[in-house]
């Protein structure tokens, strides 16, 4: 039986999970860009652009699809739900998938397996609808031949174009959101910079990946770290961090204080943080 379930945000559903009429919804405040794209999808569906056959053909060229331009109905719905989710949840300035979730977690919300969402993400990258930002924490590697997905993916201008938002309007709507964020930051006596925000998104997702993989009590990595004394533990993580930063070519401060702070942040997520008193040698 073909799955016809369609993803909707919570604002569109009542307490029983039934779809509300548009007039009855208490709309969550989301940036104008996201609202415009999501409303377009709500009214017209995802498949409204003549670009789609060309995009699917790019999948054929890299061998991810057979020589036809038709989607299997189930996979077509899964892609549609993914695009609906991204249009609602992606960051309006950077285009990144909401930092409170990893891209792989979209699968849980739209009801597909991790392997399926990985395939969809790779397809969207090949189509040119998503890209990997510079600071994602893991290169795309050979994504066309089943390489691992990066930590973070962001929408491209083509994503918005196929949903009716041209480059000029995209820039205008993003400038509105940037100005709003600058005003909000000024009230907190801070400054907002889109490039720094993008880097923060990427680094936060790196920490979330670490937590997801290693914070479980059954993780062999966690067991290994837990068996070390405090000094060994912080030194081991610090050394691995420096190796990773240098290998990636990140422009991050690698002095002892900064690295120790970063290492302890990661250890804190594992429940193995080190107290300052544990690092200070006792007075004889």
Image (cartoon, grey):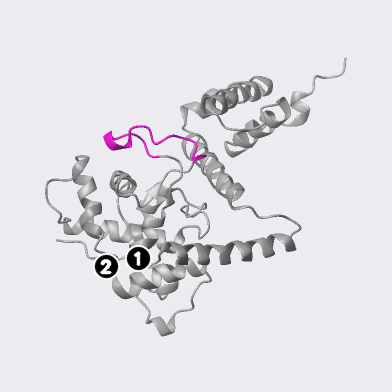
254 on left or right of 240: right
**Hey, which quadrant is residue 151 in on the image?**
top left
Could you say where residue 275 lies in the image, as x and y percent from the top left?
A: 73, 31
- Disc 1 to disc 2: CB gap under 8 Å: yes
Relative to 10, say whether 229 is above or below.
above
Quadrant containing the C terminus is top right
52 on left or right of 220: left
Q: Nearer the viewer, residue 174 or 3?
A: 174
**Which numbered disc covers residue 163?**
1
Could you say where residue 81 lies in the image, as x and y percent from the top left?
A: 32, 61
Q: Earlier in the sequence, mark 1 or mark 2?
A: 2
**Which numbered disc covers residue 82?**
none
**Disc 1: CA contacts within 10 A as few (<14), some (14-19) or many (>=20):** many
The answer to whether residue 144 is magenta is yes
The answer to whether residue 56 is magenta is no
**Disc 2: CA contacts within 10 A as few (<14), some (14-19) or many (>=20):** few
Relative to 25, say whether 159 is above or below.
above
**Which numbered disc covers residue 48?**
2
Q: Magenta part of the protein: which range?
A: 134-149
Relative to 93, say whether 141 is above or below.
above
44 on left or right of 254: left
Q: Nearer the viewer, residue 44 or 216?
A: 44
């Amino acid at each position: 039986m073909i799955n016809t379930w369609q993803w909707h945000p919570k604002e569109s559903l009542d307490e029983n999970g039934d779809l509300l009429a548009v007039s009855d919804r208490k709309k969550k405040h989301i940036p104008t860009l996201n609202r415009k794209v999501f409303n377009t999808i709500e009214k017209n569906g995802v498949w409204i652009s003549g670009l789609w056959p060309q995009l699917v053909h790019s999948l054929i060229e890299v061998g991810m699809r057979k020589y036809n331009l038709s989607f299997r109905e189930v996979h077509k719905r899964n892609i549609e739900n993914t695009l609906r989710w991204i249009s609602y949840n992606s960051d309006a300035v950077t285009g990144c998938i909401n930092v409170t979730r990893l891209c792989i977690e979209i699968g849980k919300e739209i009801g597909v397996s991790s392997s399926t969402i990985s395939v969809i993400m790779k397809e969207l990258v090949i189509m040119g609808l998503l890209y990997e930002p510079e600071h994602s924490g893991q290169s795309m590697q050979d994504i066309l031949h089943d390489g691992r997905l990066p930590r973070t993916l962001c929408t491209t201008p083509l994503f918005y174009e196929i949903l009716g938002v041209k480059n000029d309007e995209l820039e205008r709507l993003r400038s509105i959101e940037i100005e709003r964020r600058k005003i909000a930051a000024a009230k907190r006596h801070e400054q907002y910079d889109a490039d720094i925000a993008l880097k923060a998104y990427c680094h936060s997702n790196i920490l979330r990946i670490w937590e997801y993989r290693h914070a479980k009590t059954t993780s062999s990595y966690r067991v290994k770290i837990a068996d070390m004394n405090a000094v060994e533990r912080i030194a081991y993580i610090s050394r691995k961090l420096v190796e990773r930063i240098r290998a990636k070519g990140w422009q991050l401060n690698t002095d002892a204080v900064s690295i120790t702070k970063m290492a302890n942040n990661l250890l804190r997520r594992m429940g193995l943080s080190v107290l300052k008193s544990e690092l200070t040698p006792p007075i004889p």
